[in-house]
Image (tube, rainbow, N blue to C red):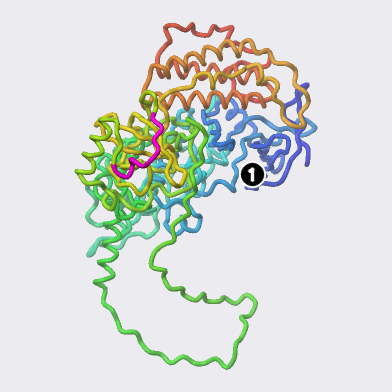
């Protein structure tokens, strides 16, 4: 089958199947040449089509709010959710249209759990990165659960993420448990090691959100705790033997990482759970101990937001280690390993006579060949740090901001480089005298020392900035001059407010901003790339709604002119609502609103590529208006869009899920 059809009847549109992207038990996934970024899942036969059609109908009727993020022109779909049904020439259902998850840019979550796999896959080894991915995972499932759907067979092997931006890429959604107005269509599979104890004797079809909550907590525990499973461990000395397989240990409640663990079980030696904050350990206890209410995905998301704000890079290994203010668990783990190695008894090597082979021989076909052991290099090879791209005043928004504040739809910065450069404050910190001298210079508007030789382009008035370092960093260096070779005065925390006084370019062409920290007046220089202007350029985001109607998909038939009046009326109210809110907010809210407004514009532009662009724009505008109304209250100066303004065009209600049929 090379030709399929999108929709039925007069609006039926032919599509060609492109290259095969993947195959599973239920069907095959193909690219669609006419619709880059979309994919088609075609079920294997009539039996599979009959089995899945009702489920796809319900998924189309109740999608989660997890639209794709766009960064530097690249779309990152967070979930491969059905967008429309597909038919054959006889108008029989054969599959569905969905966003294409690029497997070349995404990888299995399994690869993030262990140090060896991170090295092989060239993933960031910084601990804060794993905390961010855990947060994104919780965020996606908070929205999925809000919509009433459950994954059930949740495990790292069934989850993917984009290493470049830390966002999730959830696939195989037609295997989920799907809620609908006519009841639930259940999932059919669940996997050992992630099955809640109360779920063990139940069929997968009977499981719901409680099972997802258990599996989610297990995965978060593994991401935060060196890949260790929360039920991994061994019997304490002098106690009876315990089962080795994880699922049996789950059923017996052998959880050794709680605040009050059982006496007969010992944690894994690789665990760093004692460095967790008390609130974190309490959440894990609720998830894994009987008789307590498990945290849901939204609670995990919010808690991980807090944890990320508390992360402290470890000066010993700032490219890898971080902690939550309770001491570095990784350093403690390394110390235990070193102490164990030193205390282990050493035996003198035995001398054995080795027979000299009569001659060189080739291994037989199929014969296993032993690999020669290579000497340990002494220290790991660091990942290559990629240079951060510049994309305008607001284009430098870091992924870490999007991860923390924007919930289910995330827009951000590339995550490839390790978050912190080598060398902590200790090896470059300015003395108290240097700091005071720098403060005096800032107060008087002068620059002294080596920095006096730098060319400073001063601003006419002070400019407000927020600290957003990017590249996964949680802090930004505040130096005594414009360059990495100047003394490190302090570190600025994520989202701190600073006042810019001017800019200077160092010998390497890097622009630095001369700033004063708002909360305590600490002066210094910060790389411009680590700052975002705390202001908004409203006019640049006002969308020309009429021009969106002319956008066409290559190879498609000419589209009739769309009536933009309805979309434009609501859209103008949304634009002015964003403008007024951004103008009246500061700090986190202002950044969140600015990014949300950019996402609104991106969604409207994507609507221009849909068959029913007008209905798509109406739905997007109404959703953003209602989100603003819900989050910030009604706008007393703006009239709420009327029912007619939010009404339906002739092919479907605005609130209905988008289906270009």
Quadrant in the picture for residue 300: top left
Task: Indicate the quadrant containing the N terminus: top left, top right, bottom left or bottom right.
Answer: top right
The region drawn magenta spans 449-458
Residue 395 relative to residue 327: left or right: right
Residue at figure coordinates x 30%, y 50% from the top left: 424
Tell me where residue 163 appears, x and y as whole percent: 50, 46
Hey, which residue is sitting farthest front in the picture? 453
Q: Which residue is mark 1?
A: 26
Q: Which residue is outermost to the right?
A: 89
| Residue located 61% across and 86% down the image | 361
In the rendering, at what x and y percent does residue 210 appear? 40, 37
Left or right: 109 as drawn, with respect to 301: right
Q: In the shown orientation, is residue 444 left or right of residue 150?
A: left
Assign a secondary structure to mark 1.
loop
Of 202 and 234, the residue lying toward us: 234
- In this orientation, which residue lies closer to the viewer: 488 or 178? 488
């Amino acid at each position: 089958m090379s030709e399929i059809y999108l929709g039925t009847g007069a609006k039926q549109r032919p599509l060609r199947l492109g290259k095969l992207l993947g195959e599973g038990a239920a069907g095959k996934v193909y690219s669609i040449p006419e619709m880059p970024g979309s994919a088609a899942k075609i079920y294997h036969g009539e039996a599979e089509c009959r089995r899945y059609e009702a489920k796809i109908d319900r998924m189309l009727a109740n999608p989660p709010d997890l639209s794709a993020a766009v960064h530097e022109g690249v779309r990152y779909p967070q979930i491969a959710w059905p967008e429309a049904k597909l038919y054959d020439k006889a108008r029989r259902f054969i599959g569905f249209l969905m966003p294409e998850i690029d497997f070349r840019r995404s990888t299995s979550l399994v690869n993030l759990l262990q140090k060896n796999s991170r090295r092989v896959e060239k993933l960031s080894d910084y601990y804060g990165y794993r905390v961010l991915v855990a947060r994104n995972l919780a965020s996606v499932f908070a929205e999925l659960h809000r919509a009433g759907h459950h994954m059930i067979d949740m495990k790292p092997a069934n989850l993917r993420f984009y290493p470049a931006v830390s966002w999730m890429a959830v696939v195989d959604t037609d295997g989920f448990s799907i809620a609908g107005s006519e009841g639930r269509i259940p999932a059919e599979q669940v996997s050992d090691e992630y099955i809640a104890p109360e779920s063990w004797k139940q069929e997968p079809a009977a499981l719901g959100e409680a099972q997802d909550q258990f599996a989610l907590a297990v995965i978060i525990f593994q991401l935060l705790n060196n890949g260790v499973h929360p039920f991994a461990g061994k019997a304490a000395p002098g106690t009876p033997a315990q089962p080795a397989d994880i699922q049996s240990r789950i059923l017996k409640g052998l959880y050794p990482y709680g605040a009050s663990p059982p006496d007969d079980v010992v944690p894994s030696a690789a665990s760093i759970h004692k460095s967790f904050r008390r609130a974190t350990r309490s959440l894990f206890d609720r998830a894994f101990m009987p008789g307590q209410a498990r945290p849901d995905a939204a609670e995990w998301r919010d808690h991980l937001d807090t944890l990320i704000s508390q992360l402290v890079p470890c000066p010993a290994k700032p490219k890898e280690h971080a902690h939550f203010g309770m001491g570095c668990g990784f350093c403690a783990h390394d110390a235990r390993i070193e102490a164990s190695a030193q205390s282990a008894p050493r035996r003198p090597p035995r001398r054995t006579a080795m027979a000299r082979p009569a001659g060189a021989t080739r291994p037989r076909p199929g014969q296993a060949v032993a690999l020669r052991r290579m000497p340990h290099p002494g220290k790991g090879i660091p990942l290559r740090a990629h240079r951060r791209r510049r994309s305008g005043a607001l284009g430098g928004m870091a992924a870490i901001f999007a991860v923390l504040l924007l919930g289910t739809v995330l827009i951000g910065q590339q995550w490839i480089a390790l978050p912190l450069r080598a060398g902590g404050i200790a090896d470059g910190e300015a003395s108290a005298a240097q700091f005071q001298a720098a403060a005096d210079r800032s107060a008087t508007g002068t620059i002294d020392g080596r920095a006096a030789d730098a060319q400073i382009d001063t601003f006419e008035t002070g400019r407000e900035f927020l600290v957003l370092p990017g590249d996964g960093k949680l802090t930004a260096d505040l130096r005594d001059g414009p360059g990495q070779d100047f003394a490190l005065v302090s570190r600025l925390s994520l989202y701190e407010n600073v006042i810019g006084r001017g800019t200077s370019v160092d010998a390497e062409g890097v622009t630095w901003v001369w700033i004063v920290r708002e909360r305590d007046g600490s002066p210094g220089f910060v790389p411009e790339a680590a700052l975002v202007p705390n202001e908004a350029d409203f006019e640049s985001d006002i969308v020309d709604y009429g021009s969106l109607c002319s956008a066409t998909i290559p190879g498609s038939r000419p589209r009739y002119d769309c009536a933009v009046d309805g979309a434009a009326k609501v859209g103008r109210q949304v634009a002015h609502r964003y403008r007024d809110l951004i103008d009246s907010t500061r700090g986190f809210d202002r950044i969140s609103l600015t990014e949300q407004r950019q996402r609104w514009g991106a969604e409207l532009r994507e609507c221009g590529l849909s068959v029913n662009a007008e209905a798509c724009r109406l739905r997007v505008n109404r959703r953003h208006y209602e989100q603003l109304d819900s989050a910030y209250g009604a706008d007393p100066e703006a009239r709420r869009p009327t029912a007619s303004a939010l009404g339906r065009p002739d092919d479907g209600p605005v609130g209905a899920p988008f289906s270009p049929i």
